[in-house]
């Protein structure tokens, strides 16, 4: 796809997408369907969980099946101004067949909703064509490193085509699939945002290298999110606001940066960050403040 067509497509789709357009972040809603419990990699900071109180990615209060998810979309779209329907876990969207089944059904019922998903990108290269056929408009790929020396500290292993790959070997497969996948899917007309988790002392100086590479591969936007120190990374510091701003400013020299994100749950729905209108499935408003 040429640059001009891509720009106009970006402008059109992101007009109504809270995760791609800061101006719309508190105006239009998204609904997340927690139907993807399995994951195919091991990020050292992740503790996927089913609970009702935490507000962070990877957390959902329960897993839905495809029909329950379609019913949930029907109900929520009647109640509030939803423009985006997304699958963001709690595992990896692409590692769960239900994601594909769901998007097929939802497009038949709601052709006008923007279809979105987030992924670690391990299967992106293999699934790009299928995703484009399923009318996915926007995809977020989390890329935390492109340098194997750094990547091997972030990921313990990946499981690709039923084989387990550890450390650097695993990271190299993940990284190649992420970058080739971004290139392939953006050439198919899907708008790509890249999320990078800022890990002080590990990838803080490296995120600009990621920015250069993903821009070259066709990504349109980046989102720098602070590490929530958990699991094997619990002893890393949480980045402060100044550190986050510094990295965002440096990245913005290369590619546009989305700054309104406060990391929502895998079962969030409603208008992000709006008191009383941002909810998750145990029906408690999930405020971002
Ligand atoms: Fe956790 Fe997501 Fe990493 Fe999977 S890809 S281990 S769910 S953070
Ligand atoms: Fe936003 Fe990610 Fe959900 Fe898409 S999948 S609506 S980008 S949070
Ligand atoms: Fe998307 Fe949620 Fe981040 Fe807003 S806070 S940009 S809705 S992931």
Image (tube, rainbow, N blue to C red):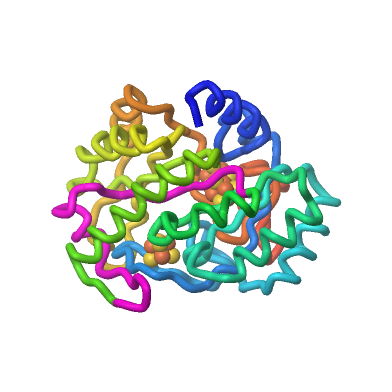
Q: Is 137 placed left or right of 162 in the picture?
A: right
Is residue 149 rendered magenta in the image? yes
Q: Quadrant of residue 32?
A: bottom right
Specify the farthest residue to the right: 78
Residue 137: percent from left, percent from top: 61, 43
Between 43 and 200, the residue placed more toward the observer is 43
Give the extent of the magenta segment: 136-163
Q: Quadrant of ligand 3?
A: top right
Identify which residue is drawn at 62% across, 73% down. 62
Residue 221: percent from left, percent from top: 45, 34
Quadrant placement of the C terminus: top right
Is residue 16 rendered magenta in the image? no
**Is 39 rendered above or below residue 140?**
below
Identify which residue is drawn at 24% across, 36% down. 209
Specify the farthest residue to the left: 149
Between 164 and 39, the residue placed more toward the observer is 164
Q: Is 205 placed left or right of 21 in the picture?
A: left
**Is 135 rendered above or below residue 256?**
below
**Is 273 rendered above or below residue 258?**
below
Residue 253: percent from left, percent from top: 32, 22
Would residue 63 be seen by someone viewing this image from the given angle? Answer: yes
Identify which residue is drawn at 76% across, 43% down. 112
Residue 25: percent from left, percent from top: 61, 35
Q: Quadrant of residue 215?
A: top left
Identify which residue is drawn at 32% across, 35% down. 211
Between 49 and 206, the residue placed more toward the observer is 206
* Count of numbered marks: 0
């Amino acid at each position: 796809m040429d640059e001009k067509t891509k720009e106009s497509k970006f402008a059109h789709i992101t007009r109504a997408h809270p995760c791609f357009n800061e101006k719309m972040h508190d105006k239009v809603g998204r609904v997340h369907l927690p139907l993807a419990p399995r994951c195919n990699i091991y990020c050292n900071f992740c503790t996927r969980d089913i609970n009702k109180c935490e507000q962070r990615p990877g957390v959902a209060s329960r897993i839905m099946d495809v029909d329950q998810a379609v019913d949930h979309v029907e109900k929520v779209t009647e109640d509030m101004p939803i423009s985006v329907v997304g699958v963001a876990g709690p595992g990896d969207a692409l590692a769960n067949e239900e994601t594909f089944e769901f998007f097929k059904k939802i497009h038949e019922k709601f052709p006008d909703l923007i279809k979105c998903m987030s992924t670690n990108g391990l299967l992106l290269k293999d699934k790009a064509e299928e995703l484009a056929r399923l009318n996915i408009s926007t995809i977020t790929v989390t890329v935390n490193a492109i340098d194997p020396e750094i990547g091997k500290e972030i990921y313990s292993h990946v499981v690709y085509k039923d084989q387990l790959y550890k450390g650097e070997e695993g990271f190299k497969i993940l990284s190649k699939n992420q970058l080739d996948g971004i290139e392939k899917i953006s050439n198919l007309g899907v708008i790509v945002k890249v999320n990078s988790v800022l890990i002080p002392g590990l990838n803080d100086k490296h995120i600009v290298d990621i920015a250069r590479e993903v821009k070259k591969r066709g990504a349109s936007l980046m989102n720098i999110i602070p590490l929530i120190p958990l699991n094997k990374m619990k002893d890393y510091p949480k980045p402060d606001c100044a550190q986050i701003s510094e990295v965002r400013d440096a990245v913005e020299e290369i590619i546009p940066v989305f700054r309104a994100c406060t990391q929502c749950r895998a079962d969030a729905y409603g208008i992000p960050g709006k008191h009383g209108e941002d909810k998750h499935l145990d029906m408690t408003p999930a405020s971002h403040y």
